[in-house]
Image (tube, coloured by chain):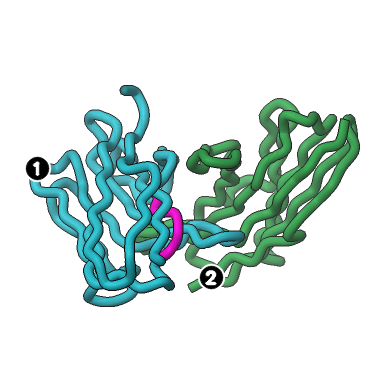
Chain colours: A green, B cyan
Amino acid sequence: QQQVKQSPQSLIVQKGGISIINCAYENTAFDYFPWYQQFPGKGPALLIAIRPDVSEKKEGRFTISFNKSAKQFSLHIMDSQPGDSATYFCAASSDNNNDMRFGAGTRLTVKP
Amino acid sequence: GAGVSQTPSNKVTEKGKYVELRCDPISGHTALYWYRQSLGQGPEFLIYFQGTGAADDSGLPNDRFFAVRPEGSVSTLKIQRTERGDSAVYLCASSPTRVRTGELFFGEGSRLTVL
């Protein structure tokens, strides 16, 4: 069922560094690309999302870069903090589908 | 409460037993989704409700799984003759509109363990 491939599986970054997580998708009908953040024992929560009419979206320390021709998008976390330590999921959906397809997740650890 | 509420938070059962998992969505949200999350994986779509009807149940793995939403609010996911492979966290999410691309509000999940 997986149509969104995410890498890396795990990532360790020093405090203040940049965290980069990548996703690739297959279905060209996808037109909404969110990133969800999940802490242990909690449900995923929307972090930031982008639609394919723009190549970049920034909200605070979080930026999505989108490459429509390559069918890839990435999450950049600037000035990473220990509180950012969580699992991050990329996802994709379209008006043609009723479901949102999630990547397998990246476990981010930010060391103090 | 303000968020999506799921009960029980943890359920341990024996192989072959029947289980029910409940989801209480955010008030006024018409769309409701069930997802299953296995260890180390992303959420996997099971079923989508728009109002009272199951608009899309294509993600249900087999006929042992069934879900209802009789009054368009609370939903129950029902699993018959549970198998060890059903062990996972079952997540419920709701959304305020019919728009299929937009934010999903997730509950904390029900962790099911089948012994």
Q: Is residue B55 visible?
A: no
Mark 2 nearby-residue class (10 Å; few <14, some 14–19, many ≥20): few
Callout 1, which amino acid? Glu
Chain letter of the residue carrying label 2: A
A18, above or below A25, in the image: above
Left or right: residue A48 compared with residue A82 = left
Residue farthest bottom in this picture: B62
Q: Quadrant of residue B63?
A: bottom left
Mark 1 nearby-residue class (10 Å; few <14, some 14–19, many ≥20): few
Q: Report the residue marked by disc 2.
A: A2
- What is the x, y in percent for residue A65? 72, 47
- What is the x, y in percent for residue B84? 41, 71
Name the chief secondary structure element in magenta: strand
The residue at the point 82 percent across, 38 percent down is: A110
Q: Nearer the viewer, residue A27 or B30?
A: B30
Q: Report the residue marked by disc 1.
A: B71
Q: Nearer the viewer, residue B31 or B18?
A: B18
Q: Quadrant of residue A63?
A: top right
Q: Secondary structure at mark 1?
A: loop
The residues colored magenta run B87-91
Residue farthest top in this picture: B1
Chain letter of the residue carrying label 1: B
Say the numbered circle drawn on residue B80. Answer: none
Residue farthest left in this picture: B71
Total numbered labels: 2
Callout 2, which amino acid? Gln
A86, above or below A22, in the image: above
A1, above or below B9, in the image: below
The verdict on a common chain for dots 1 and 2 is no
The residue at the point 59 percent across, 36 percent down is: A47
* Marks 1,2: beta carbons within 8 A: no
